[in-house]
Image (spheres, coloured by chain):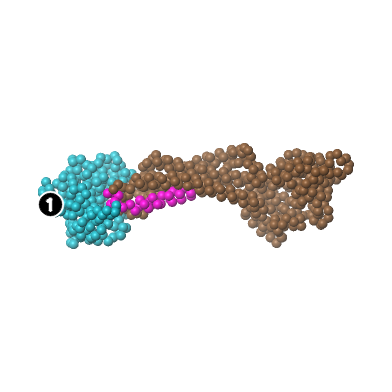
Chain colours: A cyan, B brown
Amino acid sequence: MTDNDVIVAEGIVKTYDDSGVPVHAVRGIDYTLEKGEFTAIIGPSGSGKTTFLNVLAGLDTLTEGKVWLSGKLISDMSGKELSDFRRDHIGFIFQAYNLFPVLTVEENVEYVMLLQGVPPIERHDRVMNILEKVGIAEYANRLPMQLSGGQQQRVAVARAMVSRPSLVIADEPTANLDSNTSGSLLDMMRRLNEDTGMTFLFSTHDEIVMRRARKIVVIRDGKIDGKPSSEEIQ
Amino acid sequence: MLLKLAWRNVFRQRRRTILTLLTMTGGFFLSSLSIGWMDGSYSSIIMFFTNNRTGQIQVHHEGYLEDPSIYSTISDYQMVGAFLDSIPGVRVWAPRIYSGALLAVRSPGAGSGNVFSNSAAASVIGIDPAMEEAATDFSDRIVLGEMLTASAADTSYAATGQIILGKELSIILEASVGDSLVMLSQAADGSSADRMYVIRGIISTGNADIDRNTCYITLSDAQILFALQGKVHEIAVMTRSLGAVDVLTGDISTGLSGRDLETDSWKTFAVEFYNGMKADEAQLKVTIFIIVLVAAMGVLNTILMMVLERRREFGVMKAIGTRPGFIVRMIVLEANIMGIISVIAGSIISTAGLLFLSKHGLVMDPPLDYGGTVFREMIASITPECYWIPAVCVIITASTVSFLPALKAAHTKAAKTLRTV
C-alpha cells in the first residue's frame, strides 16, 4: 500500500445467506484505487458491482478479506467507528438521489457537515460554494420535490462532496436520468474530479458514463474480469 | 437540525399526523375530564359528608373511637374550644354527647295516663343548637317542625325535654311533631336516665341509615340526663378548606398534647367512607390507563408506519455517517412533538370542558346514593392534577411507544435497505 492509494482490497469475499441459499456476490477480489481516479465499475446486472462498492465503503460486512481506506483497515472497525469513518472519508451518490424530502437543498447538503460539527458560518460558505459548482445555487431554498431528477442528483453530488471526503462512491448515478442529463452530470463530476483531485468510483452500465470514465473495471460473476480502457468499451 | 428534521417529519403525512394528534388529544381530554370530574365529585361528597354530619376533624378522649364508651369524655371542652377558636383554619366547632336509649311513644289516647305504644332503640346525640347550626346547618334538614332551642331559652320545654327524631325513626315509632315519648337509658354515674320529651322536629339528613336510629336532644339536657355535666364525647371541627385538613389535624393534635385527647381527620374516623373513595380512585386510575392505552395504540401505529415508510431514508442516513443514537433521538422527538401538541390542544379543550362542568355541573337523576348520602348534583373541579397527570401520561406514552420503533430504525442495515427497499 502506498500513500497514493485510496482503497486497497485484499481477497475480499461477500456471500449472502439471507434465504438459506448462499449467494456468492463477490468471490475474492484484489483491488487498488489510487488518488484522483475517476473509475467506473461496469458489468451486467447481478454481477456484484453494488456489493463490491458496498463492501469497499464499509456499508456491508465482508465474509472474507480486508479493505483499507485512506490507510485505515476498515474491515475490522466497529459499527460506530465505521459510521464516523464514512461520515468523514466517503461521499455517497445513490441511484435514486435519496435526498431528505423534508430538508431544503441547502439543508440536505449541509447535513453531513452538521454531523461533523462544522461551525454554521463555514457550513453555509461551503454549501453555497459547492452549490455554485454544481450549478444549482439558485435552488438552495427549494425542497427536493421542487427539483427535476437531474437537479436532485446534482444536489446529491454536492452533498457527497461538500465534506471533502477522500472518496466519492456513486452507485448507478445516472440510472434514473435521461441521456442529456446523464451526460451533463458526468461532465460536471469529471470537472469536479479534475478541479479538486477528489477520487470517484462509480458503478454503471450506462454507456454515457463509461465513455467519460478514465478507468473502467469490469466485474463478472463477482470477480474482476479485466480493466479495459474507455476506448476499448467504445 | 435534529429538531428541524423531527418537526418537519411530523408533518410529512399531515392527515395521519392529524388523526394521531386527535387520538392523543382525545386521550388527554378524557383523562383530564375524568380527573376533574372525580376530584370535583370527591370534594363535593367529602364536603357534603363532613359539613353535614361529622366535621372534617374530630377531637375525642383517647381511645373513644376504638371503644366509644360513655365514660370517655372531654372534661374541659370549653377550654379545648377556646384553643380551636384560636386556630385560623378552624371555621367553627360543635360539641356533642353520644349515648343510646330506648324510646317509647306515649299512646295518643292515653289521656293523662302513661300508656306507651311503639318503641325503638336509638342513638341519642346531644347537640348545642346554636353551635350545631353554625357548624352543620342542622335546621336546613328539618323536614317537619322546628329546631331545638337552648333549654333555658324556651320555657315551654322546661318540664319535658325537646327532641328531634330522624325521619325513618319517626316512621318506626309512628310519631310526629308534638307527640310525647319517654327516653330510658343509663347515666354515667350508674343512675337511671329517663325523661319525657316532646317531639319538636323531624329531620332527614340524607342518610336513611342514620335517620332510622338517631334522635337529637340539647347538649345541656344530655349532660344532665347522662350525668355528664360540663363534659362532651366529641368536638366536631369544621375547617375553612378541605385541603388544609391534614395540616390542621397535626396542629390541633400538637396543641392538645398531654390532655389524653386524640385528634383525627375524617380519613380516620370515617375510614370506611375514605376507603370507598380510595377504591373509586383506583377505578379512576384503571379508566385513565385504558384511555392512555387506546391513545398509545394510535401513536404506536403511526410511529410504526412512519418508520416502515422511511426505511430507505434511514439507510441513507446510516450510509452517510449518521449514528444510531441520532436516529433514535429523532424518532422519539417526533413522537414527543406530537405529544406536546396534544398536551397543548388537550389543555385548551379540557379547560373549556372543566370550566363548563365546574360552573353548571351535572344533575344526577336519579340522585347518586354514596354510602347512604344522597347527591343530586355533581360538579367538576379544576386542579393541577387535571393537567399534569394526563400530560405526563401522554409524554411518557409517546416516548415509550416510539422507543422500540426508533431502535429498529436506528439499526437499519444501510446496504440491505438500499438494495431491497
Mark 1: few/some/many CA within 10 Å (<14, 14-19, 20+): few
The x and y percentages for residue A83 are: 30, 56
Relative depth, front residue between A194 and B179: B179
Q: Does the magenta run of residues contain A101?
A: no
Residue at 65% across / 54% down in the picture?
A: B268
Query: Start and end of the magenta stretch?
Result: B391-419
Q: Left of B107 or right of it: where is B9? A: left
Q: Does the magenta run of residues contain B410?
A: yes
The x and y percentages for residue A1 are: 18, 62
Instruction: Quadrant for residue B73, please give it.
Output: bottom right
**Residue underneath mark 1:** A228
Q: Left of B401 or right of it: where is A20? A: left
The x and y percentages for residue B113 are: 88, 43
Relative depth, front residue between A177 and A141: A177
Q: The disc labelled 1 sits on which kind of residue?
A: Pro
Residue A6 in view of the camera? no
Q: Left of B29 or right of it: where is B239? A: right
Secondary structure of the residue carrying tag 1 is loop
